[in-house]
Amino acid sequence: MALLDIRNLTVKIKTSEGILTIVDKVSLTINPGKILALAGASGSGKSLVMQAIMMLRRDNVIYSADRFKLDDKDLLKLSSHQRRKIIGENISFIMQEPKRSLDPSLKIKTQIYEVMPKIKWYRFFTRIKNLIKNTKRQTAIALLHRSGIKDHSRILNSYPSQLSDVECQKVMIAMAVASEPKILLLDEPIVNLEIASRFQVLKLLDKYSKNDETSIIIISNDIASIYNFADEFAFMYAGQIVERGTREQIFKNPRHPYTASLIRSMMEMNNPDNAKKFIPVLTGKHPDYKHMPIGCRFGARCRYAKRRCNNMPEITMGKNSQYRCHFPLPDGALYSDD
C-alpha cells in the first residue's frame, strides 16, 4: 500500500490577469523507503507540487485534488487543522538554499531545539530543568552525528553565516529528521554544492531511506548525480508529468521525447569525448501559462509532432512506466542516430 497517494493534484494561482493553472492533474504515489525524483525544466511546477503536498497556505494559491491519502488517512475528509497536524507529524520539507531557510540571527543549537519534539511534562518538573537541557543537547548532537557532522560543538554554537553550504544542508537534514518523519521532501538539495559534497548529501539521504524506511521525494535537475540515488523518476513539463517510471525503464527506453532529450543531453555532457563538441539543445521555448496550448504542451518543440498532437494526449500505462504522448518512442530510440 502506498504511503502517499495523490490523484489529480491541481494548483492554480490568482493573478491580476486571472486565474492560471500551473500544476495540472498531477498524480503521485510513493511507497515506504522509496526515493522518487522529480525532474524537468525550471518553471515546470515541481516546487509547487512540493508546496501543495505540504499544503502551505498562500492567499493567491488554490489547491485541489481528487485524492490525498497519507498513511491510509484521507486528508480531504479532515479539517484544515487536522490536515496540518498529520502533515506536520509525518512530512518534513527542506527548501532550496539552506542558508536562506535558517534564521541568521539564531545559533544552530537554538534552531535545532525548536524543531525537536516537545517534552510535554517539562512544565510539571521544573526541578529537572538542567537534565532536560542536557538531554536536548545530547539529542541535537545525535542528530548532527547521523547527518554526517562530527564537529558538534562548533556547529551548535555557530550562526548560519559561519557555516559552509554543505554544513548548512546537513543541519537542515538533521532538523528535518528530528521528528522522525515518514516522508522527506527536498527541493534542489545539491544545486549549489561541489561534486564531492553532492555525493555526501545523497549518501546521507540514502542511508535514511534504507535504515529508517523514510520515503523521499527529491527535486533535482542534476540527473547525472541522482541517477543511482532514485528508485523512480517523474519528468515534468509545463505543469504536467509527461513520464514516470523505474530508473531502469526510464533510462533504458524512455517513451516521451522530452524525457529522451534530457537523458541524451546528460549522456553527451558526461561523455569525455564530447568535451569540445556542441551539445544539442531543444529548439523553441517553454509555453506561457497565460496561453497554454490545448493539445500536447510539448508539441511545439517536438520533432515527432503531428496533427493528432493538437489534442491533449491521455496517460498511457506501461509495465514499469506511464507516459503522456500520442507517438511514444520505440525501444532503443534513445541510442539510435535518428
Image: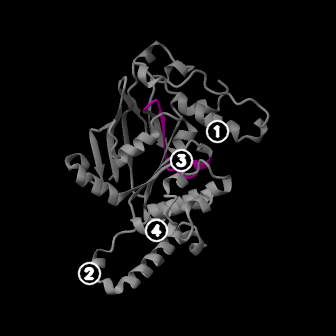
Counting from the top left corner in percent of width and height, residue 287 is at 49, 23
Residue named by callout 1: 266
Residue type pointed to by label 2: Phe
- Name above or below for residue 31 compared with residue 138: above
Could you tell me if the residues under marks 4 and 3 are in contact, i.e. CB atoms within 8 Å? no
* Earlier residue among tags 1 and 3: 3
For label 4, the crowd category at 10 Å Cα-Cα, with few meaning under 14, some 14 to 19 and many 20 or more, is some
Residue named by callout 4: 110
Distance between mark 1 and mark 3 Cα atoms: 17 Å
Image-based side of 291 in relation to 97, left or right = left
Mark 4 or mark 3, which is nearer to you? Answer: 4
Along the line of sight, the residue nearer the viewer: 261 or 81? 81
For label 2, the crowd category at 10 Å Cα-Cα, with few meaning under 14, some 14 to 19 and many 20 or more, is few
Residue type pointed to by label 1: Met
Residue 268, quarter of picture: top right
Residue named by callout 2: 124
Q: What is the number of the mark on residue 43?
A: none
Counting from the top left corner in percent of width and height, residue 6 is at 33, 43
* Earlier residue among tags 4 and 3: 4
Residue type pointed to by label 3: Glu
Which stretch is magenta? Answer: 225-239
Q: Which residue shows up at 43% across the image and 69% down it?
A: 113
* Earlier residue among tags 2 and 1: 2
- Name above or below for residue 22 compared with residue 157: above
Could you tell me if the residues under marks 4 and 2 are in contact, i.e. CB atoms within 8 Å? no
